[in-house]
Image (cartoon, grey):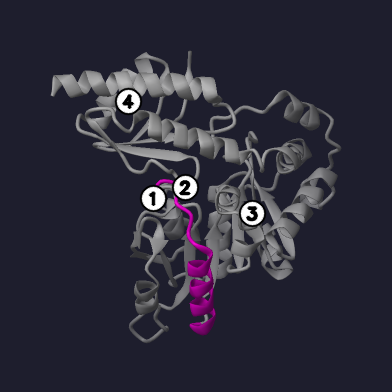
Amino acid sequence: MIVDLRSDTVTRPTTEMRHAMAHAEVGDDVYDEDPCVNLLQERAARLMGKEAGLFVPSGTMGNSIALKVHTVPGDEVLMDAEAHSMLYEAGLPAVIAHVLTRQFHSVGGVPDIAEISHWIQKESLHSPRTSLLVLENTHNRAGGAIIPLDVHRALWNLAQEREIRLHLDGARLFNAAIGSGIAASEYAACANSVTFCLSKGLGCPVGSVLCGTREFIDKARRVRKMLGGGMRQSGILAAAGLYALDHHVERLADDHANARTLAQGIADSPGIVVDTLQPPTNMVYLTTYTPASDFAAKLAEQGVLCNPTSAHRIRFVTHLDTDAVGINYAVSAIADTAQLFGNAN
């Protein structure tokens, strides 16, 4: 048995999603003539409470476009020290947007409002202009934590007062919505632009959507073209997104329940420490006494795949392709592996 808990990006299209893709009506999206893409963009914008949307190949491209549109070279961007854009997007702020990044810190994924306020600076003869604040919700490195809506609102108010833009990296924003019971549009209302991924918890093979004002999206479309993201008959992919928005949002609650089952099932195992018995969304992080790479390798021998994120830290992500049977198998394998290494110590 293989239980792949490395990421929610490993999901494969369901039979029903493949059927929707196979029967998609398509056109040339660079000419704005793909009906499925246009429908996806319109629907995404409505869900986010924004004027317009843009279908892009990946969340990384969506974030890079947002940074490029919201800034000019030499500006400063504020982002979490463990943000996806800081750690996992190949230096895009410097390479694509030509901006400086200043890192702030969060506790449990919740940004420190006072620290962010302190670092916002106006342009001077000596200093760059802070032009953009980037938030990530849910917060990957904080264990899939949900940034509370009141914090979003406080930072949105701060951004407006200090005349800077706010971009929300909402790769797993629907996980935040389901986990909190608050509509995704409520979080998106506290941002000038927002991305959400179709290819993570929603189970699509490809794609994200970037949303904002019509003026912003007009500029974003040009940057997408510049980056090579001008796809043609991409309605085949957009159809998967439309299917996912209809069928795969509410079921994210199952992934969250499976994460709790996993965390609670291995909590008493020797040689590991689980971050929380109540994961807020679909991620379980644990600390290992033995090297994480050794622990993960032993799990892989049993068919359970996971991602070490540091020398003694491992992440497990539940998703559409993991059911209760798979989770129970993973619990047993992790507990057995922990026992093995615990006895060795």
* In this picture, residue 282 sits left or right of residue 284: right
Residue 41 location, x and y as percent? 75, 53
The residue nearer to you, when weighing 230 against 4, is 4
Mark 3: few/some/many CA within 10 Å (<14, 14-19, 20+): many
From mark 2 to mark 4, how far is it between C-alphas?
23 Å
From mark 1 to mark 2, how far is it between C-alphas?
10 Å
Amino acid type at circle 3 is Arg
Which is more N-terminal, label 4 or label 2? 2
Mark whose residue sits in front, 3 or 1: 1
Residue under the image location 48 percent in, 59 percent down: 147
Asked which quadrant contains residue 329, the reply is: top left
Q: Which mark is residue 280?
A: 2
* In this picture, residue 111 sits left or right of residue 191: left
Which span of residues is magenta-colored?
Answer: 142-162
The residue nearer to you, when weighing 329 against 40, is 329
Q: Is residue 182 magenta?
A: no
Instruction: Name the residue that disc number 4 marks.
Output: 296
Mark whose residue sits in front, 3 or 4: 4
The residue nearer to you, when weighing 205 against 298, is 298
Mark whose residue sits in front, 2 or 3: 2
Instruction: Name the residue that disc number 1 marks.
Output: 142
Mark 4: few/some/many CA within 10 Å (<14, 14-19, 20+): many
Kindly check if marks 3 and 1 are in contact, taking CB atoms under 8 A apart as contact: no
Instruction: Name the residue that disc number 3 marks.
Output: 224
Secondary structure under tag 3 reads: helix
